[in-house]
Amino acid sequence: MNETDQQRLHELGKKHKKFLEDYTINIDGYKVNNHLFFLAMYMSKFSENPKAYAVFSLEHHNREEAKEAFYPLFFYFSTWNIILEVVQHRAQVTFSILEEVRDYLARIVNARLSAVDMTVYERSLNILQNMLDLQEEMKHLWQSADQMDKQITEKGYVDDQEIEQLILYHIKGHWIQYAQFKDRYTYRKDFDVIYDNRNIPEVKKHEKFTRKKTLYNMRSNIAADQLKKSIAHLTEGKAPMDYETFMDHFYDVYKERVQQQFEKVKPMLRYP
């Protein structure tokens, strides 16, 4: 969008702004009958919570078209904000401590030590490696979402197919987190064994941690509560869930919740 059109949009937004309000207009639009519409949000200067919405177009249109654009625009921006909060944030989390523990376990497994139960070490190594692989998947997921956002901005509008894809990105982000935690929780007591074995001479020589309490903090009585809470939050108490069940269930749940949220904000449409 060129600067002239952006200025025209902001003039429309300013026209419907009330006293002590701020407003934002997102320049990613949505088309109805080939007419391009944009969503404005009005907030109090003392709060970030939205007070009202407006749907504008720089083209000739009718009121019903603008009202029709309200829902997909609201759906799109609600979903994109969640992706920023969940997928982008999670993709930026560093797993350097887990990498250190993974490498520690790998050294012990490769040494085939007879002084410890190798089954525990091999299983924990596989679990941590899977968590790290899933973190790479989260990074790729964010890169895909970010690339789509750039493409939407470049063409100037979002379509229904892209909105659907963003929903899947959002739900996939939650699935990846659940998949990272579930086996770690199931076999949480393995790290009690690993911690207890830490001072065996053949084991001790493989220890190379940045933080002294790394293995201590991996024990079940420290990690279990947070893992359990995270799993319960991500699955809404429905764990265990496989990938297809998770994606199908929360796809339907998410769409229903956004629809319910939209019904609450519909009366907040200030224009048209």
Image (spheres, rainbow, N blue to C red):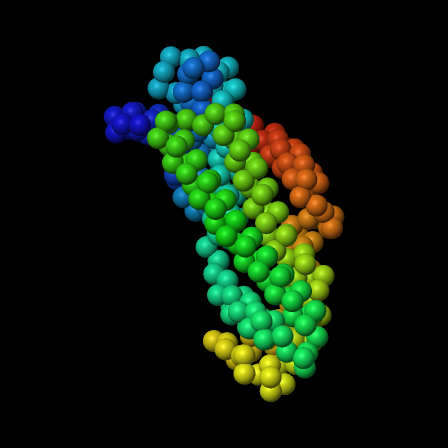
Query: Residue drawn 69% across and 66% down?
Result: 188
Give residue 140's position: percent from left, percent from top: 48, 46
View extreme (bottom): residue: 201
Residue 218, by quadrant, is: bottom right
Whether residue 13 appears in this view of the structure is no
From the viewer's perspective, is residue 27 above or below residue 170? above
Residue located 59% across and 52% down the image: 177
Name the residue nearer the viewer: 160 or 109: 109
The residue depicted at 56 percent of the width and 53 percent of the height is 134
In this orientation, does residue 177 appear? Answer: yes
Residue 241: % across, % down: 72, 47
The front one of 58 and 137 is 137
Q: Which picture quadrant has residue 168?
A: top right
Of 203 and 227, the residue lying toward us: 203
Camera-nearest residue between 96 and 126: 126
Residue 127 in the image, given as x and y percentages of width and height: 63, 61
Q: In the image, 231: left or right of 67? A: right
Apparent side of residue 91 relative to residue 4 in the rendered image (left or right): right
Residue 48: image location, x then y, percent? 46, 44
Could you tell me which residue is drawn at 57 percent across and 69 percent down? 106
Q: Residue furthest left?
A: 4
